[in-house]
Image (tube, grey):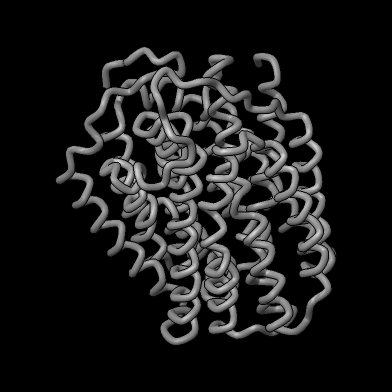
């Protein structure tokens, strides 16, 4: 790997290892250990991130205008680590909800700011974004698997929060080793952090719509996967871990080659259509699955969706907005997606309590079907792919 690429690889390893734990086990912990109801789970998933939405584009504009991306990232991770400890001490719903809001306010800026630093490094070193992000896939897989096995042996209450803090703490140490982004004078006058220009960019608005309706959807309903596997399909924590392996190991392998070999050849349109088709298949399998093992067949298709959308979204964004506004664009998009994740989290909790977890996946199937129709009818995806050096490649 080129100089400093290993730091990015390890950073994403521990960052995604930390992200996957609350996404997989937090609702199970709240339901089984603290006795939260389905509606309370929905409120926590929704409200805890809803009130932080205003902050997300602010973080991006501060980053673009000050150029202090690394300093912001250190602050976010240090705050996040401290707040995880506070959350682990809560037993009352309202107190847990308040801390959850603060966690999301700190956490929400991490991904877009980290991606900004990574894309800047990639453009200067010639590295590939998907290769650097592949560390996150294997980190998430190993983290979820290890937590499930240890939870089965020692109990979830003794494993979840210590593991969560360990992963985020390790990511914080690696943030200190990331390079600083050096501000450059653009060839033509570009206003840094210009929000008005972004909201007038039709391709950018299209990308936000697609990510809101498809990319963020699995994240929004993912907290109920553990509940579905354990409560509805009568599995256990080990089954949850195996499902995580089925999701993340193939994802890691595909991520290593997708951005380098696949995306430049097939182009954005085919990549996005492939991702949505796989989502349709996945949610259909989830809805009809009679046991955890059939459920995992749908999980295996996650590798196509994640590789296409995770890499595709960042690369597409790099193609359609100026570099000087990249962090603002990324955080604005993340802000809108956070609203979607809040809505999916809350609605998922309501559906789970009144209809059952299976119906969550039927509604998800209908939503991604609408996205498929949208992508088939648009021309916004018809742009040539360019590698980090700026040279166009035919799709």
Out of 274 and 392, give the one closest to the viewer: 392
Residue 75: % across, % down: 74, 48
Q: Quadrant of residue 179?
A: top right
Q: Is residue 124 left or right of residue 142?
A: left
**Above-or-below relation of 388 to 209:** above
**Above-or-below relation of 55 to 69:** below
Query: What residue is rendered at 26% in x and 35% in y?
Result: 269
Out of 8 and 250, give the one closest to the viewer: 8
Q: Is residue 55 visible?
A: yes
Query: What residue is rendered at 68% in x and 62% in y?
Result: 103
**Dividing the image into 4 quarters, which one contains the N terminus?**
top right
Q: Is residue 41 left or right of residue 365?
A: right
Residue 292: % across, % down: 52, 63
**Dividing the image into 4 quarters, which one contains the C terminus?**
top left
Residue 30: % across, % down: 68, 76
Out of 15 and 104, give the one closest to the viewer: 104
Query: What residue is rendered at 81% in x and 47% in y?
Result: 169
Q: Is residue 190 left or right of residue 158?
A: left
Q: Is residue 78 left or right of residue 246?
A: right
Query: What residue is rendered at 68% in x and 44% in y?
Result: 72
Q: Is residue 273 visible?
A: no
């Amino acid at each position: 790997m080129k100089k400093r690429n290993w730091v990015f690889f390890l950073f994403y390893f521990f960052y995604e290892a930390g992200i996957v734990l609350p996404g997989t086990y937090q609702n199970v912990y709240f339901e089984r250990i603290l006795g939260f109801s389905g509606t309370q789970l929905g409120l926590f998933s929704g409200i805890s991130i809803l009130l932080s939405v205003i902050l997300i584009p602010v973080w991006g504009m501060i980053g673009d205008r000050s150029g202090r991306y690394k300093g912001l990232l250190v602050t976010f991770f240090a705050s996040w680590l401290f707040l995880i400890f506070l959350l682990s001490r809560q037993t009352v719903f309202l107190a847990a909800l308040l801390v959850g809001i603060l966690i999301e306010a700190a956490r929400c800026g991490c991904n877009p700011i980290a991606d900004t630093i990574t894309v800047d490094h990639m453009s200067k070193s010639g590295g590939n974004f998907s290769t650097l992000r592949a560390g996150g896939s294997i980190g998430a897989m190993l983290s979820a698997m290890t937590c499930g096995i240890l939870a089965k042996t020692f109990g979830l209450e003794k494993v979840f929060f210590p593991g969560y803090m360990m992963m985020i703490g390790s990511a914080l140490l690696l943030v200190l080793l990331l390079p600083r982004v050096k501000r450059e004078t653009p060839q033509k006058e570009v206003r840094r952090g210009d929000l008005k220009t972004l909201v007038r960019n039709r391709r950018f608005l299209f990308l936000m719509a697609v990510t809101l309706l498809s990319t963020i959807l699995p994240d929004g309903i993912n907290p109920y996967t553990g509940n579905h596997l354990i409560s509805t399909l009568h599995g256990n924590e080990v089954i949850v871990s195996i499902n995580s392996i089925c999701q993340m190991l193939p994802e890691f392998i595909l991520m290593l080659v997708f951005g380098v070999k696949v995306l430049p050849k097939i182009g954005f349109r085919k990549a996005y259509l492939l991702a949505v088709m796989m989502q349709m298949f996945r949610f259909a399998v989830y809805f009809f699955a009679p046991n955890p093992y059939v459920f995992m067949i749908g999980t295996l298709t996650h590798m196509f969706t994640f590789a296409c959308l995770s890499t595709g979204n960042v690369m597409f964004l790099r193609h359609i907005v100026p570099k000087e506004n990249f962090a603002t664009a990324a955080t604005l998009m993340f802000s809108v997606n956070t609203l979607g994740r809040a809505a999916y989290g809350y609605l998922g909790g309501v559906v789970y309590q009144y209809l059952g977890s299976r119906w969550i996946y039927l509604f998800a199937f209908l939503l991604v079907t609408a996205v498929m129709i949208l992508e088939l009818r648009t021309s916004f995806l018809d742009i040539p792919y360019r590698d980090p050096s700026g040279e166009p490649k035919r799709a």
